[in-house]
Amino acid sequence: MYEMTIQLQTDSKVRLYEQIYRHIKQEIIEGKLLAGERLPSTRSLADYLQVARSTVDEAYGQLCDEGYIEACPYRGYFVCAVEEWLQAPMQDVDERVENAVRRPQGVGDNGRGASDTFRDEIYESDTRTRSWQVDFSPYAIDMSAFPMSVWKKLSRKVLTEAEVDLFAKGDARGDLGLRRSISRYIHSARGVECTPDQVIVGAGNEYLLMLLEKILGGNLRIAMENPTYERSYRIFHSFEYEVVTVPMDDSGMIVEELKKTKADVAYVMPSHQFPTGTVMPIGRRMELLNWANGAEGRYLIEDDYDSEFRYRGKPIPALQASDKQGKVIYIGTFSKAIAPAIRVSFMVLPPVLLEKYHRECGFYSCTVSRIDQRILEEFIRDGYFERHLNKMRKIYRAKHDLLMDSLKTMRKSFDISGENAGLHLLLTSKTEREEKWLREAAAAVGVKVYGLSDSVVDGEDIPHNGTVLLGFGGLDEAAIRQGVELLKQAWYK
């Protein structure tokens, strides 16, 4: 067992559990803790450090979630086999970024944005004519807590103080103030390393993916996890890309299978995969980065669609935070965190692709109103966004915990997965009940549930046919209780 010496700073603003987490993580990264080594038990480490055992539990839990260590029942905690960290620095990154942003930008016609809302309906023919008692949509969010008064106040302020130049044509990438606020936020919250110059703002993820298609060029082979987010799959198909699917295991996309596809680009959701809820551990992330570094022109598209909502530990760092070679294209959105109608998404381009953007796409106009950009900028800059996120985390955690508690009596018949993050979880039948039966039985009592098969692409046969998704984001507590009771009636009759 590895004997650990940790100097805790009791007068530091950094919480004790995070100091423990950071120390162990750094020891693993630097190779001072080797794969397979056993860590001290939570009790013994807590006694040694003179802290509460729950403090060590929280640190170990975060390390487990990120894949640095694993818990073995009745044996303890052990260091995972993490591939060597990529030590080669990104050569002349600052110089390439600086050269890229100095390139002249052309002027062109306005681009057309597209919606970045999640797929609204799964079996549409039923939904359009039917009224549901409870709809467990995994795509809905809670709008009751939207800070309407703050948004109105900022809107009035922006319009009152606006100068004429605010109504002129702005930077094609989005206004600098908003891009600066976004870069600061994703660095502090997600560990993303970028300058404001690398941030591209657009009205929806679809617009950014269409822009990315112009940057990357045609005749590419795109690899996607299966099951995956179907809207992105359809978008890539609309580009006439060759889209190939890669199977997953408990750690996410299987890299050995990815290698067989001869893909140029891989689209992944490492912090919370949709729809499975898988959190990709650090070892698998390193494998993906090594794959991307294996050939020129390979890239990873990281879709970080709802990383703000974790209910245990702290948010998992972005894959881009581990990228040393400029291989990750990071995409985020405010649709889940604030509201779908905000219509603002953003993309962080590596320096090489930023140069291509200015050379080949700089004439596209930004698709987000400059008024909306300024309001969002002030919403983030003045701390309203952080306060709103903290409030929504509490709201969603209460709903998450209520749904988990309500499902306790169903654990003999169902496995529950995908919990502790996001706005939905998965139920997988332990019996011979198939997904179609589960959905139809639920519909018979007025409850809409969503099938895992809806996210399976290419017609491939994915295991867990008896798996359904239960979303809780758009439901109040009464609806969650009612929905679960109705499901028990439907599935246990």
Image (spheres, helix red, strand yellow):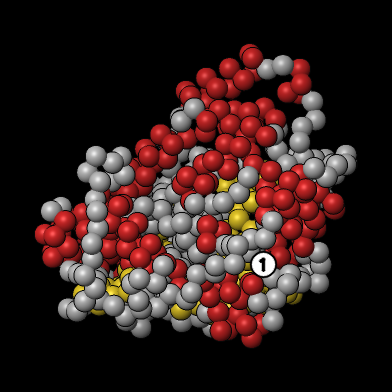
Task: Write the residue at 85% across / 53% down.
Answer: 360
328 horizontally vs 33: left or right: right
Task: Write the residue at 36% across / 63% down.
Answer: 25
Nearer to the camera, 142 or 111: 111
Q: 10 Å neighbourhood of mark 1: few (<14), some, or many (≥20)?
A: many
Vertical relation: 250 (above or below) 356: below
- In the rendered image, which residue does mark 1 sit on? 299
Which quadrant would residue 304 be assigned to in this image?
Answer: bottom right
Q: Position of residue 281 (x, y in %)?
A: 43, 69
Residue 122 in view of the camera: no
* Extreme residue toward the top, this view: 160
Task: Write the residue at 46% across / 47% down.
Answer: 189
Nearer to the camera, 1 or 370: 1
Q: Secondary structure at mark 1?
A: strand
Q: Position of residue 124 (x, y in %)?
A: 58, 59
Q: Position of residue 237 (x, y in %)?
A: 73, 68
Vertical relation: 130 (above or below) 144: below
Q: Quadrant of the C terminus?
A: bottom left
Which quadrant would residue 368 be assigned to in this image?
Answer: top right
Q: Quadrant of the N terminus?
A: bottom left
Residue type marked 1: Tyr
Vertical relation: 31 (above or below) 259: above
Task: Write the residue at 53% across / 75% down.
Answer: 287
Q: Position of residue 422 (x, y in %)?
A: 42, 55
Vertical relation: 378 (above or below) 311: above
